Image (spheres, rainbow, N blue to C red):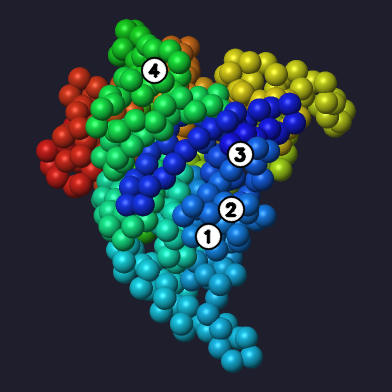
Amino acid sequence: MSKSFGAVQALREVRLDLWAGEAHGLVGENGAGKSTLVKILAGAHPADAGTLTVDGKELRPSGPGDAQAAGIAVIYQEPTLFPDLPVAENIFMSRQPLRSLRRIDARAMRSATAELFARLGIHLDPDRPARGLSIADQQLVEIAKALAFDARILIMDEPTAALSGVEVERLFSVVASLRESGAAVLFISHRFDEVFALCQRVTVMRDGRWVSTDPAAGLTVDELVRRMVGREVSSLYPKAGTTAGTTAGEPRLEVRGLTRHGVFADVGFAVRGGEIVALAGLVGAGRSEVARAVFGVDRYDEGEVLVDGRRLPRGDTAAAIAAGLALVPEDRRQQGLVMELSVERNATLTRRWSLSRLGLLFGGGERAAAREWSERLRVKTARLTDPVSTLSGGNQQKVVLAKWLSTEPGVLIVDEPTRGIDVGTKAEVHRLLSELAGQGVAVLMISSELPEVLGMADRVLVMHEGRLAADIPRTRADEESVMLAATGQNGGAG
């Protein structure tokens, strides 16, 4: 299979075979061509060359409907729900059960949705709108949508990126039942432990080419990384104590008694200059909600937020930015980027006034500023004028980082900074966070990946059901202490 987009060769004679009753892992750096291959299989893009066969018959899908009719269902990395429609309608979009006179049978649709949720162990109201669902719940709805097709080929593109351990186990049990029924599963993930736990064979891609396909039992993580990046990754977590051995400075961010009724209560902590503080906890513990309140996206009922000793007004993001605060959100597509705009426009959205003259924005200054940060963060793009939607997930994340780092913040809040990006890009993001801390920036990092938390943080704040359960220094932080606190046990108290 080969595919080009203008001068960019996205795929070069890639080959892949999926067997019935098998989970097949597909790994590679962001930009390796995995998403392009998935979109061809899903009928979203036509291939320039190559063949696709399903059950021995050649398939030339002219659109997603043809692929679905052939039994191919895709769960994409980013949820694609209609926010104002009920969950049930999202699941059965274009396939709603009908009554007489072609009227939608809402009762049958709700009943079928409830059956799918019961199969997945999901506790959601089929009638509730998709808007406001967490990333984890949106992903579970996407999984239910795919299962509604009774697919024989299920392609899962980073399906566990925003799921908790319990939700991942539940998903794996569903995948096991699909395999037992004879389905073929293509599992794309940057989490190697999941690939080895779930998959029987693993294919590696690099720079749009096929590199290898081997039984998972004969591979190691180090070997996979070498094949993916074509080199050794020297250090995934380049963090050796606070600010590479120096002491942290004065508190730059102080949160005191922050409360939002029904969401979180009496949250208080400080982050010093040169310090990376991790905010850990299970999905739903309130971590992202606290970050949004601190930055002014959401209002809070009680408490106060101070930056460099000055109190911020509630619910005022402009004041937060002016005070030197920056927030890289969890959902980069919905909250971090304007997908229809160019790379350069997205990278400079926070600096449009400083780049304008007499209220007019000139392309030259915008392009120069975007090019500077694109080069510093090694954003892979053919042209800065291309829509940011054409970039891989890891490069989109770099554009979000560029947008906020260009403001030269004193306090940087990053929510799941490496969700859904490859091991090479993870190392680059971790290096960047360490460098920023070394320059005196206070970094608050929200992460669901324990290795990332333990590898990067000087202190670990653990939340449980909307409250801070522990403050654990780096020297005493381990997986057991963090998980004990995250599950409400006393063993993790700092």
Q: Is residue 114 above or below residue 41?
A: below
Instruction: Give the distance between the C-alpha atoms of the residues marked 4 and 3, in whole angstroms.
Output: 28 Å
N-terminal of the two: label 1 or label 3? 3
Identify the residue under disc 2. 59
Q: Are marks 2 and 1 in contact (CB under 8 Å)?
A: yes
Q: Is residue 368 left or right of residue 73?
A: right
Q: Amino acid at mark 1?
A: Ala
- For mark 1, what is the residue? 70
The residue depicted at 36 percent of the width and 34 percent of the height is 202
Mark 3 — residue?
A: 50
- How packed mark 3 is, by other alpha carbons closer than 10 Å (few <14, some 14-19, many 20 or more), is few
Above/below status of 486 relative to 435? below
Circle 4/circle 1 CB separation < 8 Å: no
- How far is the residue under mark 4 from the one under mark 2? 34 Å
Say which quadrant the N terminus sits in. top right
Q: Residue furthest bottom?
A: 100
